[in-house]
Image (spheres, rainbow, N blue to C red):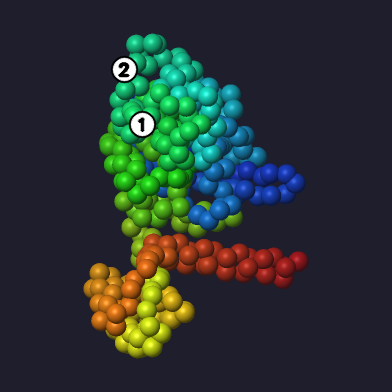
């Protein structure tokens, strides 16, 4: 895969970024990623995910610390090193009058690819990202999901060793998201991949390592499976329609189910939390059958917090608590 031998694919050492006047975006991040690994970067908005990815590809200069890619120092002047990376930012800007095939051909030329090399790659990439039927349409008329897939194709045009993607599932419908996950799984067989995402399930499914950031700090770095341990129960919201008296009777029965950690009725919505050790399918089936027995129609259903999301929420809560403790200790020392 790589000619870097046994080098660590990515190593950051006390990587810190401060935006003026005094905004600490990243604080002393230490990270190692082996070649062939898939890293998922998680965290709330403003946690520092995009800043980290921009530092990894040399689009920004660290305030202190350093980034090594395949054993070489990354920075704004490391053009040859960036040739080995495929990067997709969270918000790509396209030439709107161009077409996908023209845009990809242009990106290939920027990477120094010959015409023959570009032609051999274009068809495969357009099919892999499900853009073959859109290849001659103006980019301006493409949907958000199509533009996201075009960004993925552009990051792959030069067959890089390292892929760094910021929110690659943004704007994708469920079918396109599944295709993206399948594509990532195939690429992971031969490449090192870094993915910033809000989809914890995707990270657990695809990644070999997870990094959770909060306000520039690392709150978790390890096996994605660990995120599910000690997690909060899944939360499900069910929008319903029916007779108010029947709704009240159904809710009374649902609230007594042993599989549920809790239940709440809010007008035409039932909110339930399922015990982590209970069968989610059985618990949800019992709730839906109870609603049907009372002739209550289910209008919509949303899972608002899976086990992993709950684990991350717990991590962030613990980190906030530690931050308050540190602030208190500093004030006492002063």
- Reading the image, the residue beneath label 2 is 120
- Seen in the picture, residue 90 relative to 273 is either above or below; the reply is above
- Seen in the picture, residue 275 relative to 52 is either above or below; the reply is below
Mark 2 crowd level (few <14, some 14–19, many ≥20, 10 Å Cα): few
- Seen in the picture, residue 234 relative to 253 is either above or below; the reply is above
| Quarter of the rendering containing residue 134 | top left
Q: Residue at x 39, y 62 (%)?
A: 308
Q: Would residue 134 be seen by someone viewing this image from the given angle? A: yes
Mark 1 crowd level (few <14, some 14–19, many ≥20, 10 Å Cα): some
| Quarter of the rendering containing residue 171 | top left
Q: Residue at x 42, y 62 (%)?
A: 309
Relative depth, front residue between 321 and 46: 46
Return the x and y of residue 265 as percentages of the image width and height: 43, 81
Q: Secondary structure at mark 2?
A: helix
Return the x and y of residue 82 as percentages of the image width and height: 49, 26
Return the x and y of residue 169 as percentages of the image width and height: 41, 45
């Amino acid at each position: 895969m790589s000619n870097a031998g046994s080098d660590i694919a990515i190593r950051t050492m006390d990587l810190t970024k401060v935006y003026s006047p005094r905004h600490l975006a990243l604080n002393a991040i230490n990270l190692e990623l082996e070649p062939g690994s898939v890293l998922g970067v998680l965290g709330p908005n403003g946690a520092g995910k995009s800043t980290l990815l921009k530092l990894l590809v040399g689009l920004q200069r660290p305030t202190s610390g350093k980034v090594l890619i395949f054993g070489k120092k990354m920075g704004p002047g490391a053009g040859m090193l960036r040739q080995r990376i495929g990067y997709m930012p969270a918000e790509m800007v396209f030439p709107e009058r161009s077409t996908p095939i023209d845009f990809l051909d242009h990106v290939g030329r920027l990477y120094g690819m010959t015409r023959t090399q570009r032609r051999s790659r274009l068809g495969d990439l357009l099919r892999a990202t499900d853009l073959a039927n859109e290849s001659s349409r103006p980019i301006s008329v493409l949907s958000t999901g199509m533009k996201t897939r075009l960004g993925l194709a552009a990051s792959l045009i030069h067959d890089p060793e390292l892929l760094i993607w910021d929110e690659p599932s943004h704007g994708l419908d469920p079918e396109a998201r599944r295709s993206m996950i399948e594509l990532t799984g195939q690429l992971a067989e031969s490449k090192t991949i870094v993915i910033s995402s809000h989809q914890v399930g995707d990270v657990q499914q695809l990644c070999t390592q997870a990094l959770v950031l909060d306000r520039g700090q690392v709150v978790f770095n390890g096996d994605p499976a660990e995120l599910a341990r000690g997690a909060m129960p899944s939360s499900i919201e069910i929008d319903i329609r029916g007779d108010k008296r029947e709704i009240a009777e159904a809710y009374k029965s649902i609230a007594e189910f042993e599989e549920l950690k809790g239940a709440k009725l809010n007008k035409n919505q039932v909110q339930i939390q399922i015990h982590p050790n209970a069968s989610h399918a059985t618990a949800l089936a019992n709730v839906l059958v109870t609603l049907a027995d009372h002739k209550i129609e289910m209008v919509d259903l949303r899972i608002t917090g899976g086990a992993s999301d709950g684990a991350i929420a717990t991590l962030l809560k613990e980190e906030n608590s530690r931050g308050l403790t540190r602030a208190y200790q500093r004030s006492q020392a002063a």
